[in-house]
Image (cartoon, rainbow, N blue to C red):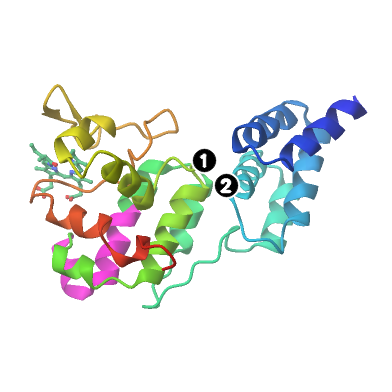
């Protein structure tokens, strides 16, 4: 009834992310009335910097496949809820699109491709990046990629999430791999079938960095100035 809608609306505007996300799901379950509240909130928040809540609402409205809702989204945000600044003219639009669709497997592949694009034509041809190239990545671009992953994964995925975990484990790779489910019982998780391509994965599970050539690339990624305080 009306009370429920008012309460859920209030819950969306509260401080707890967990409660915000559960309100989104409850509103979704209420059908058309709930969708209207979600749309109104998203539009109301348009001038604010996008948060995980905005990403979630955008995803659930998009997922309804209702043309009217898709129309509202496209009209306000033709490229998705997040801006995607790049210091190198790299287009992250297709990445945002895959993340909105929660196609985390394709988004992961595209992320690796975008890192190659960022490193230049030699890396695009090679199909992987050297750690020395990662060191030269612009702060802006890594922050854009990370922001896209975090906002569209309930804060679960992204390089900065991996960095936080890795630091909390004293930068110990042996402790880090099983924590993000890249290793189990000392056996590497097999690409792609062994990985978990949805939000049931542990924090930091995605994006992937192939360890075939050692940890230096990932180490450069996790120690990049992009993650420094105030960067
Ligand atoms: N793969 O095992 N991986 C590939 C991961 C390793 C291997 C791609 C991640 C261990 C081979 C991605 C893990 C290993 C290829 C990842 C993992 C190994 C390949 C596609 C857990 C053997 C074929 C992008 C750490 C023991 C490609 C890419 C090639 C591909 C990711 C083997 C994203 C996170 C040490 C043979 N693996 N990879 O980079 O280059 O090709 O031959 O990490």
Q: Position of residue 186 (x, y in %)?
A: 11, 26
> Does residue 174 show up magenta in the picture?
no
For residue 193, above or below residue 117: above
Q: Which of 9 and 229 is in front in this view?
A: 229
Indicate the position of residue 156 as horizontal and vertical percent values.
44, 40
Residues under numbered marks 2 and 1 in contact, where contact means CB atoms less than 8 Å apart: yes
Nearer to the camera, 77 or 5: 5
Residue found at the very far right of the displayed protein: 2
**Looking at this rendering, what residue extends furthest in the bottom direction?**
88
Is residue 130 something that shows in the picture? no
Q: Mark 2 points at which residue?
A: 52
Above or below, 221 relative to 69: below
Determine whether the residue tagged by mark 2 lies in a helix, strand or loop: helix
The residue drawn where x is 59% and y is 48% is 55
Of 152 and 10, which appears nearest the observer? 10
Q: Point out the stretch of residues depicted in magenta.
A: 110-127
- Location of the N terminus by quadrant is top right
* Residue at screen point 41% across, 62% down: 229
Give the residue at mark 1. 154
User: Upstream in the sequence, badge 2 or badge 1?
Assistant: 2
Indicate the position of residue 20 as horizontal and vertical percent values.
66, 36
Q: Residue lying furthest left in this view?
A: 213
Membership of 123 in magenta stretch:
yes
- Callout 1 environment at 10 Å: few (<14), some (14 to 19), or many (20+)? some
Secondary structure under the numbered disc 1 in the rendered image: loop
Looking at the image, in which quadrant does ligand 1 appear? top left
Classify 10 Å Cα crowding around label 2: few (below 14), some (14-19), many (20 and above).
many
Q: Is residue 148 rendered to the left or right of residue 15? A: left
């Amino acid at each position: 009834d009306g009370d429920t809608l008012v309460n859920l609306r209030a819950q969306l505007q509260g401080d707890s992310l967990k409660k915000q996300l559960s309100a989104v799901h409850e509103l979704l379950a209420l059908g058309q009335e709930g969708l209207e509240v979600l749309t109104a909130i998203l539009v109301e928040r348009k001038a604010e910097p996008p948060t995980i809540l905005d990403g979630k609402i955008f995803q659930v409205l998009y997922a309804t496949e209702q043309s009217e809702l898709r129309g509202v989204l496209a009209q306000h945000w033709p490229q998705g809820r997040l801006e995607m600044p790049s210091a190198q003219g790299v287009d992250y639009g297709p990445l945002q699109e895959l993340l909105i669709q929660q196609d985390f497997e394709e988004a992961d592949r595209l992320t690796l491709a975008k890192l190659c694009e960022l490193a230049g034509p030699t890396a695009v041809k090679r199909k992987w990046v050297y750690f020395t190239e990662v060191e030269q990545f612009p702060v802006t671009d890594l922050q854009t990629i990370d922001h896209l992953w975090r906002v569209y994964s309930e804060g679960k995925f992204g390089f900065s999430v991996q960095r936080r975990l890795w630091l909390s484990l004293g930068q110990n790779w042996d402790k880090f791999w099983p924590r993000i489910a890249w290793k189990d019982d000392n056996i590497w998780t097999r690409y792609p079938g062994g990985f978990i391509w949805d939000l049931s994965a542990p924090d930091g599970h995605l994006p992937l960095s192939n360890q075939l050539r050692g940890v230096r690339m990932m180490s450069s990624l996790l120690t990049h100035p992009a993650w420094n305080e105030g960067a």
